Amino acid sequence: MVAVAGEPRSGRLGVLGWPVAHSRSPAMHRAAFAALGLQGWSYQLLPVPPELFEETVRALPGAGFVGANVTLPHKQAALTLADHASERARAIGAANTLSFTPDGTIWAENTDAPGLIAALGIDPAGLSAVVLGAGGTARSAVWALRHAGASVAVWNRTPERARALAEALDVKVVDRVQPVDMLLNCTTVGLDKWSSEGNAALASLGLTTDLVGRCAIVVDFVYASRPTQLLMTASDLGVNIVDGLTILSEQGALSFELWTGHDAPRELMRSAAAEA
């Protein structure tokens, strides 16, 4: 990870996104601050539309912020505006964690990739995977799996975007999803609660119930007050699942450690996110 010069200090943190009201990150980080007795730290929602993203980020250090997480749709923009970035973030082409030095220098890191591998709980080397989506989260998932030795393909509702991601990260692109060892949803399907339920939700991802049932692991980066339709379908069919809260807590723990210099209380953060 990017090592930011200077001793860990208290300060303001937040999560940048549009929308971002659904984020469990504030509850997760606040619970960690309280558990470790870290005084002077705060974490808040930072709803920012794309057209104001750069202006807002550059103003954060002057407002006392020492870092921020970044979620949809800003992960690629976060990398672009950073003054320095880790090799991992540059290779992925997206950042989900920003750190600010007192002089306003912006450092970019990607904790989504290692967070996903930790959340899987298995070694993906030699396994086949299809990543649904072509945004910043999908880029992180593709890079993480390929870097870990998996055989990765990308699917997206807009084929041109899938091809661009696949070419950038040297993986395959598919126009039709087939059964694989690991199926990962990195789109926003499921984020809008239950506007697309049942077979309609699966169809919007190029999936069928039969196809989901023939996968070994189904991962959904989306998290809500109850499991997404994709995860419920997979679970009902006896498929192993990894939910968005597990991934959120793992990547959040890595961001927490980067900013504070303290070991993150991972189980507590996962519980706080689930209860938020």
Image: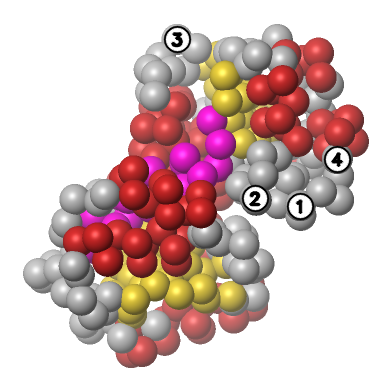
The secondary structure type at the circle numbered 3 is: loop
Sequence-wise first label, 1 or 3? 3
Q: Which mark is residue 224?
A: 2
The overriding secondary structure of the stretch rendered in magenta is: helix
The secondary structure type at the circle numbered 4 is: loop
Please name the amino acid that badge 1 sits on: Lys
Q: CA distance from mark 1 to mark 4?
A: 9 Å
Q: Residues within 10 Å of mark 2 (few under 14, many from 20)?
A: some
Q: Are marks 4 and 2 in contact (CB under 8 Å)?
A: no
Q: Are marks 4 and 3 in contact (CB under 8 Å)?
A: no
Q: CA distance from mark 1 to mark 3?
A: 34 Å
Sequence-wise first label, 4 or 3? 3
Left-right relation of 61 to 226: left
Q: Residues within 10 Å of mark 4 (few under 14, many from 20)?
A: some
Please provide percent x and percent y for residue 38: 20, 70
Please name the amino acid that badge 4 sits on: Glu
- In which quarter of the view is residue 79 placed? bottom left
Q: Which residue is mark 4?
A: 197
- Of the pair 214 and 275, the residue shown nearer to us: 275
Q: Are marks 3 and 2 in contact (CB under 8 Å)?
A: no
Q: Which residue is mark 3?
A: 126
Sequence-wise first label, 1 or 2? 1
Please provide percent x and percent y for residue 210: 81, 13
- In which quarter of the view is residue 257 placed? bottom left
Q: Is residue 160 above or below residue 194?
A: above
Q: CA distance from mark 4 to mark 3?
A: 33 Å
Of tags 1 and 3, the one toward the viewer is 1
The secondary structure type at the circle numbered 2 is: loop
Q: Residues within 10 Å of mark 3 (few under 14, many from 20)?
A: some
Is 136 magenta? The answer is no
Tell me if residue 3 can be seen: no
Q: Which span is picked out in magenta? A: 242-260
